[in-house]
Image (cartoon, rainbow, N blue to C red):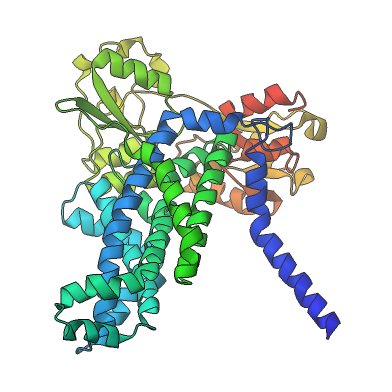
Amino acid sequence: MRSGGGALAAVSAGVYLFLYAPILVLVAFSFNAGRLTAAWTGFTLDWYARAAQDPQILAALRNSLKVAVTATAIATAVGTAAAVAFHRWRFRRQPALDTLVTLPIVVPEIVMASSLLLLFAALRLRLGFLTVILAHVGFSVSYAVVVVRARLAGFDRSLEEAAADLGATPLRAFFRVTLPLIAPGVLAAALLVFSLSIDDYVITSFVAGVGSTTLPIQIYSMVKSGVSPEINAVSTLLLVATSLLLWAASRLERGRRGWGTAVPVGAALAVLGAPFLLGRGPAGGERVLNLYIWSAYISPETLAKFERRQGARVNVDLYDSNEALMAKVQAGNAGYDVICPSNYVVQILQKQSLLRALDHSAVPHLPNVDPRFLDRDFDPGNRYSVPYFWGTTGIGYDKTKTGPVDSWGALWDPRFRGRILMLDDGREALGAALKWKGFSLNATDPASVRAAEQLLIVQKPLVRTYNSSSFEDILLSRDVWLAQGWNGQFAKIMGIDPRL
């Protein structure tokens, strides 16, 4: 019996280790003095200080708190009312309505997100705070109903009847008798809704618009250009906050015994979050430019200089993939003035009449741009776009393991089986195959594309992983010897390790 218990304990410990070890690593590396996460170089709190001074992170946190507080208030009120109605009355088709109320709990988030995006587009609602709040209320109200109904399950209806016998109206009886008794359940529901709202990424990424980038979107967008200690620091703070909220909710569900610890936790988090809710909004009559751009493509200093020079405010929202950008723009209700997509996206959006032609007289410095980057095939004459950012995709490698690399063919070399990393980007992977075979990166003829496709199929058993967010860390840790990636990240790690 004991041996069986020991085996079960070992399995349980292994499961918990599997679940929580990544979180512990994230927390530990948020205190790492080194910028890259490949090795521990010392203890520091600098990354927390930097995160607290990053205007984009602070703006995203402010947005998350505004959305979470508003959605929590609405969802808790609606959920409590629905729970009381289900508990107090019986009516026709109640089982069907009950199913509809709880359905959002089991519907996949991606399905709900795309459905909400289509709904808001059909209603011609501009994507922004309103759509995010409506979406959060939509998916979280079900949780509020379930939690409050669980509290009502042990409620003694005779107390309400006694209040009515003493002359109390139904509304007065609810506020004086029912609500105080179910208050722990209501507050537990509110804390649960708040934690779900402030953590949500999938649904929010579909329905967020101008000026409504939340902290999860900000973090995920930053991760796409590399996992930095600032991200670990912000993620740790978010993890601590939501863990405390869920713990407080579980204490409240126990009844009055949990108030002594749960309420102070909620109050402390509210006090800490209050300053972020008081950030400045656009002043009356202030000009606003709404920019949709990839993470780390524009510095806060540049934005500050632009705002001072132009007397305007810039709302910066981040996207994590070209597909996400196209989905927002194609919905027709995004509201962005300037977007910064990859080159091929310009051609797609232009064919769909989703871009406005440029007034070249308003871009007097365009002729100063290197002619090599003008009048490209995706936008002849630069009618809809101007070049903003240029970089290269190449191969980073450990020269002590591979020797000199002078061809894309190295990524197909069987000697490096299991030590090759490719970008998790279909266009980049296909581009590498096309270039190795001597075709243009923009080749469209079926024969060239099929040849590249076959090369990628042959290559797949050789590849250790497909990764676009932390390929430089993986190469630096020597988990791979060759990595397809972008020159900026490679330049950083080459300065750290001369063997690369």
Q: In this view of the protein, which residue sits in the foreground, 216 or 470?
A: 216
Q: Answer above or below: position of 427 versus 364.
A: below
Left/right placement of residue 237 relative to residue 388 reads: right
Q: In this view of the protein, which residue sits in the foreground, 92 or 351?
A: 92
**In the image as oriented, which residue stretches furthest toward the front?**
166
Q: Answer above or below: position of 417 versus 291.
A: below
Residue drawn where x is 52% and y is 55% of the image = 244
Observer able to see residue 321: no
Left/right placement of residue 356 relative to residue 12 reads: left
Residue drawn where x is 22% and y is 18% of the image = 360
**Residue 86 percent location from the top left of the image:** 27, 81
Residue drawn where x is 26% and y is 32% of the image = 281
**Residue 425 percent location from the top left of the image:** 52, 45
Left/right placement of residue 448 relative to residue 490 reads: left
Q: Which quarter of the rendering shows the N terminus?
A: bottom right
Observer able to see residue 188: yes
**Residue 459 percent location from the top left of the image:** 66, 50
Q: Answer above or below: position of 137 versus 99.
A: above
